[in-house]
Image (cartoon, grey):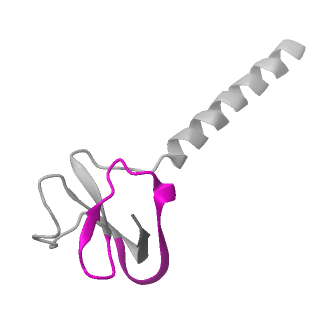
Amino acid sequence: MKNLKSTFAVFALVLGLGSALLTSAAPRHLNTKIWGHRTDGSYVDLTGEDPADYRCTGTTQICKAEYPDTQNPNANPANPISTVAGVFSGL
């Protein structure tokens, strides 16, 4: 009986850790870049940058946008894959 309780405890721990890791990772599409939308209208490439170096506050405009890696939103900002609302600051 004691062995069965230990087995269930280990199973629950592994299941809990696995679930936490799978749900906490932010999804990112392959072959895309993340761009920050500055208040002057230009975009800055955030791919590979440390998220501690920039932030999004508020909800009034587009703060970050994800585009295919072959598209430069400074030349063509149409059809982002996804966006995050806010005001971009940093970098």
Determine the residue positioned at 11% across, 53% down: 70
Can residue 1 be seen at all in this image of the molecule? no
Q: Quadrant of residue 16?
A: top right
Q: Is residue 56 visible?
A: yes
- The extreme right residue here reads 2
Residue shown at 78% from the left, 26% from the top = 9
Indicate whether residue 13 is drawn in magenta.
no
Residue occupying image coordinates x 43% and y 72%: 89
Looking at the rendering, the stretch of residues picked out in magenta corresponds to 37-63
Tell me what residue is drawn at x 25 percent, y 80 percent.
41
Residue 58, above or below 56: below
Q: Where is the N terminus found, in terms of image quarters?
A: top right
From this view, report whether residue 90 is shown above or below residue 8. Answer: below
Q: Position of residue 83 (x, y in %)?
A: 33, 69
Locate residue 42, reporting x and y percent. 23, 74
- Please give left or right for residue 56 compared with residue 40 in the image: right
Query: Considering depth in this image, is 46 or 85 the residue closer to the camera?
Result: 46
